[in-house]
Image: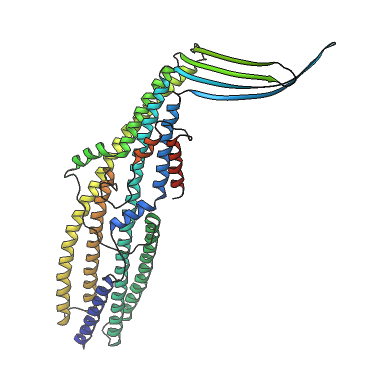
């Protein structure tokens, strides 16, 4: 009698294994989506990329604005006035207007204008590196969302299978209770485990739902049938080599280096403020009085030079301030180096751990398969109970899921390492995305064209097209 119930439970367990295998197979009609597809979607969908491209264009315009300081300034002015005066003998009323044209040209300002142009250029270069850093963030968020959904899917499958296994355990316990082989306590234990399994399944489904929403936010659409990606090849064989690459290529470090250069130039601008300035100015004016035949014409051309002698210590304070700001940015450079090196070390350690976990989990799966076959054979001889068979089956399934999770961690750690080295960009990954040239807009505006020029009208068309996207 005992052998018969054991064989029945083994057959039920085999059915459960087959059902799990069928559930693990992806639907034939589901849309296959690769990791590259997810990153392309995130690249195109990200508003963060659009924002920082606009900030880069704004920085480009700062170069044009600084360039304008070396060019003539032409302005017109007009006045319309009424005056009244009276004494004991004469009353005078005058209504008149004047119009004038003024032109000024800075001939010398101690080099401050040229230095401001160089500061603006360094700021542009720093902003370009910020854009690269944002691109890495966008792509890495897509990678994390991709693997989070894959992992959550596998955990849901695990919990569903666990629920089926415990149902079989409960059924077997009830069958054996009917024939007096076990007590009511065994049945209650199985019922408690079943309730816990349902709670764990609900939690896993909630994690999957949150993962889908995170994927939608990062990529711009719901995930399809996510295809298992291959292991990415790391560009360095040792940790020291990886850190060396990162310190040469990471956009965060390059950004701070350009900020240090801009701060050094800021000190020179503060020093230039103490030097003399020379300005050439010219004026043309016309005056007309409506109640008189008198009118007037005027013209002047002048060369003006001035230099501050004493401003209450303001210029010296600004110079000291610029030096302190330079020192602060140098501190940022040191912090950036340490942070990048630490992030590379952390990513490298995670990659090594995940690789070791894959090896150990592979051995665990192999041993669990042998154990499951052995327990199943022993059960046919009556040496094992139904619960022994189902527990061994569950151990095998847990080992397989652990292996799958470790494989996911290995690939994810590889992409995290690339990001920490500054190499997770669309160009380096050969992603099929629209190319964006950060220098294209700069080349259009660096000469500070006006809206009335041909180049200025071309810029207006570019900005209008960007605004419609």
Locate residue 163: give its quadrant: bottom left
Locate residue 325: give its quadrant: top left
Please indicate whether residue 178 sits to the left or right of residue 102 in the image.
Answer: left
Frontmost residue, 275 versus 354:
275
- Residue 238, percent across and down? 17, 43
The vertical placement of 224 against 97, above or below, is below
- Residue 247, percent across and down? 25, 37
Locate residue 170: give its quadrant: bottom left
The answer to whether residue 115 shows anywhere in this view is yes
In the rendered image, the residue lying farthest to the front is 293
Q: Residue at x 56, y 14 (%)?
A: 300
- Residue 327, percent across and down? 37, 26
The vertical placement of 51 against 262, above or below, is below
Please indicate whether residue 190 sits to the left or right of residue 51 in the image.
Answer: left
The vertical placement of 370 against 55, above or below, is below
Q: Residue at x 18, y 44 (%)?
A: 236
- Residue 376, percent across and down? 17, 77
In the rendered image, the residue lying farthest to the right is 88
Q: Residue at x 32, y 54 (%)?
A: 40
Q: How many marks?
A: 0
Please indicate whether residue 334 sits to the left or right of residue 53 in the image.
Answer: left
Frontmost residue, 289 versus 243:
289
The answer to whether residue 323 shows anywhere in this view is no
How are the residues colored?
rainbow
Frontmost residue, 395 versus 333:
333
Quarter placement of the N terminus: bottom left
């Amino acid at each position: 009698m005992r052998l018969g119930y054991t064989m029945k439970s083994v057959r039920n367990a085999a059915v459960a294994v087959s059902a799990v295998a069928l559930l693990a197979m992806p639907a034939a009609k589901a849309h296959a989506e690769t990791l590259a597809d997810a990153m392309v979607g995130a690249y195109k969908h990200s508003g963060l990329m659009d924002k920082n491209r606009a900030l880069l264009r704004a920085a480009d315009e700062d170069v044009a604005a600084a360039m304008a300081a070396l060019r003539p300034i032409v302005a017109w002015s007009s006045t319309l006035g009424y005056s009244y005066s009276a004494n004991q003998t004469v009353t005078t009323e005058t209504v008149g207007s004047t119009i004038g044209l003024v032109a000024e040209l800075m001939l010398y300002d101690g080099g401050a204008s040229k230095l401001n142009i160089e500061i603006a250029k360094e700021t542009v270069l720093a902003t370009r590196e910020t854009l690269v850093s944002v691109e890495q963030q966008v792509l890495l968020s897509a990678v994390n969302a991709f693997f989070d959904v894959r992992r959550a899917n596998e955990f849901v499958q695990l919990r569903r299978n666990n629920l089926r296994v415990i149902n079989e355990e409960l059924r077997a316990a009830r069958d054996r209770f009917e024939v007096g082989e076990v007590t009511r306590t065994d049945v209650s234990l199985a019922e408690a485990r079943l309730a816990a399994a349902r709670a764990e399944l609900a939690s896993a489904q909630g994690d999957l739902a949150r993962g889908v929403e995170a994927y939608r936010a990062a990529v711009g659409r719901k995930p399809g049938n996510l295809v298992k990606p291959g292991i990415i090849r790391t560009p360095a064989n040792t940790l020291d080599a990886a850190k060396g690459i990162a310190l040469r290529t990471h956009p965060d470090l390059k950004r701070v280096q350009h900020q240090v250069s801009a701060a050094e130039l800021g000190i020179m601008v503060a020093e230039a403020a103490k030097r003399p300035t020379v300005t050439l100015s010219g004026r043309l004016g016309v005056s007309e009085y409506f109640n008189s035949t008198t009118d007037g014409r005027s013209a002047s051309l002048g060369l003006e030079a001035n230099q501050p002698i004493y401003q209450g210590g303001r210029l010296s304070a600004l110079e000291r301030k610029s030096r302190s700001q330079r020192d602060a940015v140098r501190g940022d450079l040191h912090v950036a180096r340490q942070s990048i090196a630490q992030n590379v070390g952390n990513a490298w350690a995670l990659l090594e751990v995940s690789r070791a976990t894959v090896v150990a989990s592979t051995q665990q799966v192999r041993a669990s398969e042998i154990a499951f076959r052995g327990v199943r054979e022993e059960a046919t001889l009556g040496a094992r109970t139904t619960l022994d068979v189902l527990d061994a089956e569950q151990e095998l399934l847990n080992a397989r899921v652990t292996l799958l999770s470790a494989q996911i961690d290995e690939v994810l750690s590889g992409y995290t390492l690339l990001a920490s080295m500054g190499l997770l960009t669309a160009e380096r990954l050969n992603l099929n995305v629209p190319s964006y040239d950060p220098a294209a807009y700069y080349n259009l505006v660096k000469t500070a064209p006006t809206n009335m020029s041909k180049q200025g009208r071309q810029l207006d068309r570019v900005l209008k097209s960007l605004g419609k996207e």
